[in-house]
Amino acid sequence: MHPPKPVCRHCHSENVAPAAVAGTGAIETYTINYRAWVPGLQVPLVIARVRLDGVPGVYLTTNIVNCPVEEVRFDQKVRVTFEEQDGIFYPLFERVT
Amino acid sequence: MGNREAYISGIGQSEVGVRLARHPLLLTLDAINEALADAGLAIEQIDGVFTYPGKMSSFLGFSPVSSDDVIEALGIKSKWHLGGGEQPAQLAAIASAALAVKEGLCRHAICFRTVYEAAALSRPEEFPPLKRDFVDGMSQWTAPFWAFSAACWTAQYAMRHMHRYGMTREQLAQIALNASRNAVKNPRARAITREELTLEKYMSARMISSPFCLYDCDRFTDASTAIVVSAASALDEVKCEPVRIAAVSGSVDRYSWDQVEWPAAYETGEDLWKRTDYKPKDVDTVQFYDGFAFLPLTWLEGLGFCGRGEAHVFIEGGHRIARDGELPMNTHGGQLGAGRLHGFGFAHEAVTQLRRKAGERQIAGDPRVAIATSGGGPMAAALLLARD
């Protein structure tokens, strides 16, 4: 489940813990964002909803990186690539080639 | 007329502008005074106050006035009041007022929504902007990926419609084109829309978040809209033509926008028809929330005016949704053309049309039934309004 909660929304079990997922998935939908919402933001950039492999119904909002924005497609296979900032690792995704 | 019905008995609106100097509480009182005059009621007769989403001290531009502020400022002896964001969507405040008058908790309730986003941005020392150095709740899963705006969240539903059903930008454009054609006939939209938009201008506009360009997104507006809701048993005190709240519906699946497959407009739309004998073919005009141009398409499909995945074909060319079309939509200009009044503008316009008071933009015939909607993504609320 995502986002994490101390109870499962399906069976209401409190026996919940973080679990590793495959780190791969496919692009469910996306948008090419052209607007710099904060000063200095490099645009255009792709904001996507990735459906993760092996966990049906779990999506992650993320960015698709390391490819030109116009080459992003629906259902494209992607894998995670982490970007670290101040000790936090952000899960971004890139195309599986 | 059953004696347990709720009615809209008065509507009012302040000046609608961008960077207005007038204090937001005073704008709210302007809207309330117009609504009271419209209803023929005195402030002493008001005993309920409802608003959405309640005052937000951390984000005053978004919601600068509380129901308590109004009660205090006007000396209202309130028997029931409510303001909060944890409701299905903006128009839920009116639905809650309807429930309260039906139950006899109050007799005449003021509902209002005041927005001050443009003015607040221009006067940050007075109205501090939302702090961006901390995120929690849903934002912690979206903001780190620059998905700050509901434009980016809603755009992803629209992109999927293009992919699955073949919607084009030219088809989507009809929402903004229709809005601007109607807005130029609306005196209260003058600060927002000065001239009709053309398809050419639309197609060459700056992109915000694909497929949305500048004209697919509403803009910050300063205004207040007020709606008076009265119990059937108190209608003999009302001077104007009342409009019955024939049905309401609302839903939220879960608040996380990015985990929801279908916007709540589908479930809310289906539910509305379970609570009335009216059918889609009885509806004379629709006022659909259009904070982003894709949202009215979800309402067309969700309420069954066309099938799922067919709304872009339904609006193609703009004839069906025009003022003289089979289903006139957003006849005041919607939020795209008449400003981001945040949901309440749709109820205001539905009542105006049903009373045949819309002047130059009045739809033809004898309109009896209208729908007003609000919300987007996983939250939605709808009102079915009827003039008996």
Image (tube, rainbow, N blue to C red):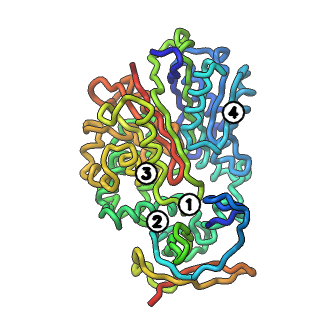
Distance between mark 3 and mark 2 Cα atoms: 15 Å
- The answer to whether tags 2 and 4 share a subunit is yes
Which of the labelled discs sits on residue B295, or is there none? 3
Picture residue at 68% right of the left edge, 83% below the top: A84
Residue that badge 4 annotates: B67
As rendered, which of B160 and B336 lies closer to the eye? B160
Picture residue at 54% right of the left edge, 81% below the top: A93
Distance between mark 3 and mark 4 Cα atoms: 28 Å
Distance between mark 2 and mark 4 Cα atoms: 35 Å
Picture residue at 42% right of the left edge, 66% below the top: B210
Q: Residues within 10 Å of mark 1 (few under 14, many from 20)?
A: some
Q: Secondary structure at mark 4?
A: helix
Horizontal and vertical percent position of residue B141: 63, 67
Looking at the rendered structure, the kind of residue marked 2 is Ser
Residue that badge 1 annotates: B149
Q: Which chain letter matches label 4?
A: B
* Residue B129, placed above or below residue B305: below
- The answer to whether tags 2 and 1 share a subunit is yes
